[in-house]
């Protein structure tokens, strides 16, 4: 499975996926300053699950889940450090399976998450 980390996530979060999954950060593919549409297009074309803190991606009218391989939106306070963000991500991945990402938008908060499919 492939994952794409948005610019608002720490680059060091890539370590959570090795060696089981292939993961890219937008900096790796020269999309660090790209629009949401370009990031979504890359994720769709490469069948990657997008992981972001950008709440715009949680809007199922704007980003219909059935059109994408999966979107995970971390809804966390802005003051969280890289280590805290990675801790929340690691706990989330322990509670889910790869199948739950497909064609869904998952909203992750500390200690809980909800899966939205259309």
Image (tube, grey):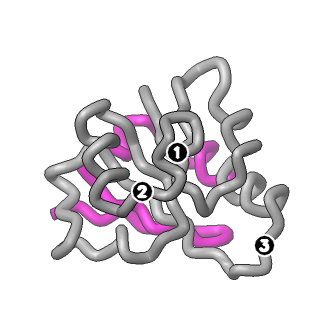
Q: Tell me the mark number nearer the camera, choosing from 1 and 2.
A: 2
* Residue shown at the point (77%, 55%) measured from the top left: 87
Identify the residue under disc 1.
26
Find the residue positioned furthest to the top.
Answer: 19
Judge left or right: residue 77 versus residue 66. right
Give the Cα separation between the discs numbered 3 and 2.
24 Å
Q: Is residue 100 magenta?
A: yes
The segment highlighted magenta reads 91-118
CA gap, disc 1 and disc 3: 20 Å
Residue 100 lies, in percent from the top left, at: 37, 45
Q: Quadrant of the C terminus?
A: bottom left
N-term-proximal mark, 1 vs 3: 1
Image point 60% across, 62% down: which residue? 8
Q: Of the residues under marks 1 and 2, which one precedes in the sequence? A: 1
Residue 111 forms part of the magenta stretch: yes
Nearer the viewer's eye, disc 1 or disc 3? 1
The image's mark for residue 34 is 2
Tell me the residue at 49%/35% (across/down): 29
Label 1–label 2 contact, CB within 8 A: yes
Q: Is residue 117 left or right of residue 70?
A: left
| Residue 80: mark | 3
Q: Is residue 116 left or right of residue 83?
A: left
Q: Secondary structure at mark 1?
A: loop
Instruction: Tell me the element at label 3.
Output: loop
Q: Position of residue 63 (x, y in %)?
A: 22, 65
Task: Estimate how packed mark 3 is, as few (under 14), some (14 to 19) or many (20 or more) residues with alpha carbons within 10 Å.
Answer: few
The answer for how far apart the CA atoms under marks 1 and 2 are is: 9 Å
Asked if the residues shown at circle 3 and circle 2 are in contact, with their CB atoms under 8 angstroms apart, the answer is no
């Amino acid at each position: 499975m492939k994952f794409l980390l948005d610019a608002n996530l720490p680059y060091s979060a890539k370590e959570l996926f090795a060696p089981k999954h292939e993961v890219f950060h937008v900096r790796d593919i020269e999309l660090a300053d790209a629009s949401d549409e370009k990031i979504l297009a890359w994720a769709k074309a490469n069948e990657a699950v997008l992981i972001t803190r950008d709440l715009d991606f949680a809007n199922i009218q704007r980003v219909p889940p059935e059109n994408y391989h999966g979107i995970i939106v971390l809804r966390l306070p802005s003051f969280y450090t890289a280590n805290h963000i990675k801790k929340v991500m690691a706990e989330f991945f322990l509670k889910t399976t790869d199948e739950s990402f497909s064609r869904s938008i998952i909203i992750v908060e500390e200690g809980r998450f909800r899966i939205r499919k259309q």
